[in-house]
Amino acid sequence: MSNDIPNFNLLAVFSAVMEQGSLSKAADQLSTNQSTISTALARLKKEIGQELFVRKGRGVAPTSYAQSLYEQIKAPINELNGVFQSMANFDEQSSERKFVISAPEHLQWVLLNSFAALPNQNLSLEVFDQPDNDERIYEDLLT
């Protein structure tokens, strides 16, 4: 295996195949086709240099390496999927999220005025001053 981290999309495909137990079911889950799934698995196999699945009847069975890999990546994959899902479900009209932004002083008033004009008053904004020069940034990092 190289020192490079495999492409996230390949790991997501791998995870779907592990969960579904078949390429066609994984393709359905990911709204793609079986050929795309097969190609992605071949790319992942090449990237990590390990066999991932063996044919078993009409489906596939994971190798011991694939089982081990899946156990290590399933929680982070699920967590990332949750992040993207929550972002997709964001409703600016009903959200009560707090936004924290760092901006240069000359942009802070623009941000605050724009934010105040939003119809949802349940949102909150906290703005931190961002230094305008490199020397001040360096000093702030040291403190």
Image (cartoon, helix red, strand yellow):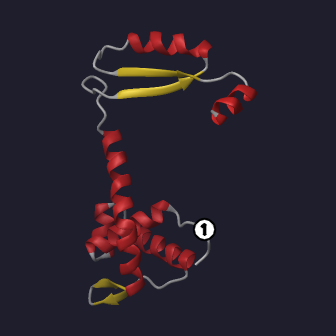
- Up-down relation of residue 136 to residue 26 (above or below): above
**Image quadrant in which you'd find residue 140:** top right
Q: Position of residue 37 (x, y in %)?
A: 41, 70
Q: Disc 1 residue type? A: Asp
- Up-down relation of residue 99 to residue 81 (above or below): above
Element type at marker 1?
loop
Q: Position of residue 59 (x, y in %)?
A: 29, 83
In screen coordinates, is 13 left or right of 139? Answer: left
Quadrant in which the N terminus appears: bottom right
Q: Decide if residue 31 is in sight here.
A: no
In screen coordinates, is 51 left or right of 121? Answer: right
Q: Residue at x 32, y 83 (%)?
A: 60
Report which residue position mark 1 lands on: 4
- Up-down relation of residue 64 to residue 79 (above or below): below
Considering every residue shown, the one lying at the far front of the view is: 143
**Image quadrant in which you'd find residue 114:** top left
The local crowd at label 1, few if under 14, some if 14 to 19, many if 20 or more residues have their Cα within 10 Å, is few
Q: Position of residue 121 (x, y in %)?
A: 29, 15
Q: Residue at x 27, y 85 (%)?
A: 58
Numbered-mark total:
1
Q: Position of residue 83 (x, y in %)?
A: 36, 47
- Nearer-the-camera pick, 58 or 14: 14
